[in-house]
Amino acid sequence: MSKQALTVIGLGPMGQAMVTAFLENGHPVTVWNRTASKADELVAKGAVLAPSIKDALAANELVVLSLTDYDAMYAILEPATDALAGRILVNLSSDTPEKARAAAKWAAGHGAQHLTGGVQVPPPMIGKEGSSTYYSGPREVFEAHQETLKVITATDFRGEDPGLAAMYYQAQMIIFWTSMMSYYQALALGKANGVDAKDLLPYASNMMSMMPHFLELYAQHVDAADYPGDVDRLAMGAASVDHILHTSEDAGVDTVLLKAVQDIFQRGMAKGFEGNSFSSLIEVLKKA
Ligand code: NDP
């Protein structure tokens, strides 16, 4: 059976990896990029470079976008909106859930359908086992193109709200960036005490490996909105956070991150949560 033909717009490292995976799996691929020279290697592998964005859109119903953000999408597609009718835009550019929702409406206004995607892996993982992408938008559109999309990564459909794929992606990135900052904070403390990163590494890894247990326990607290202080009490946590802040001050390392954490604990204490689990801090953080 012949493989579905598609267009890929955006040939940064991610778009290039995706086009390569589609070509290797026998999909005819038309490409377009603002900087046309980035298509050279892909054309040598069998991709067709469209001479204009309108030609790229006219070539195929299925159009994958891999751009820096949604502003780049508008910069490219606004001058070509009359070529959008009947297209399926699979937008694998990262941005906010609100921008994804607005883009779905914008696409519908031009007769196109929009699937939001959030790719969870870097370019070298495209087309490899263990990679995955969040999708959200019209279910029937997702299901109609799932087989083709599976070429680049496994697919994880999160629901019909176009913002959901972006929300899951950003939630994951919140965990990534803030966890990595906590790691660097610990390494800075180590360095100030003459301890190298490689010496702290096994202990940092051990702490991270315990996290799934805590994540599961506190997910139950948060969903039940019940924060029993039977294992940990917020007052104990607040004292511990004071200790890590004072330790860092004594060592002369930056404390902005730890002061932010202390602030959240203090606001929980001010709300009278001292006898609850520190999972009660969700009440400080969540939308009122
Ligand atoms: P890049 O930022 O390198 O992609 C740039 C692409 O966007 C290029 O095709 C570039 O064109 C185009 N572009 C940017 N601004 C404009 C504009 N104003 N007008 C026209 N074209 C524009 O990103 P990646 O390829 O690395 O990633 C693509 C998406 O995938 C991003 O949203 C990223 O967040 C996401 N992602 C990336 C990961 C990674 O590790 N790389 C991991 C997971 C997700 P030109 O070549 O002409 O500059």
Image (tube, grey):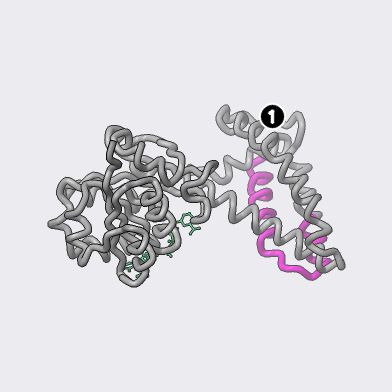
- Work out whether 84 lies above or below 143: below
| Mark 1 crowdedness (10 Å alpha carbons): few <14, some 14-19, many ≥20 | some
**Would residue 196 appear left or right of 183 to someone viewing this image?**
right
Residue 84, how many percent across, how many down? 17, 53
Q: Name the residue under label 1.
A: 228
Tell me the chief SS of the magenta region. helix
- Residue at the spot 41% in from the left edge and 64% down from the top edge: 12
**Residue that appears at 58% across and 45% down:** 284
Is 251 inside the magenta-drawn segment? yes
Helix, strand or loop under label 1: loop
Q: Position of residue 167 (x, y in %)?
A: 44, 45
Residue extending farthest right? 194
What count of labels does the image hold?
A: 1
The quarter of the rendering in which ligand 1 is drawn is: bottom left
Q: Could you tell me the amino acid type at mark 1?
A: Pro
In front here: 87 or 147?
A: 147
Q: Name which quarter of the figure residue 275 lies in.
A: top right
Q: In this view, does 60 lie above or below 254?
A: above
Where does the image place residue 229, in percent across and percent down from the top left?
A: 73, 32
Image location (x, y in percent) of residue 97 = 39, 49
Please state which of residues 198 and 215 is positioned toward the viewer in this rendering.
Answer: 198
Q: Is residue 76 magenta?
A: no
Magenta region, residue range: 244-272
Cβ(mark 1) to ligand 1 < 8 Å? no
Residue nearest the observer in this picture, 255 or 121:
121
Q: Residue at x 42, y 50 (%)?
A: 21
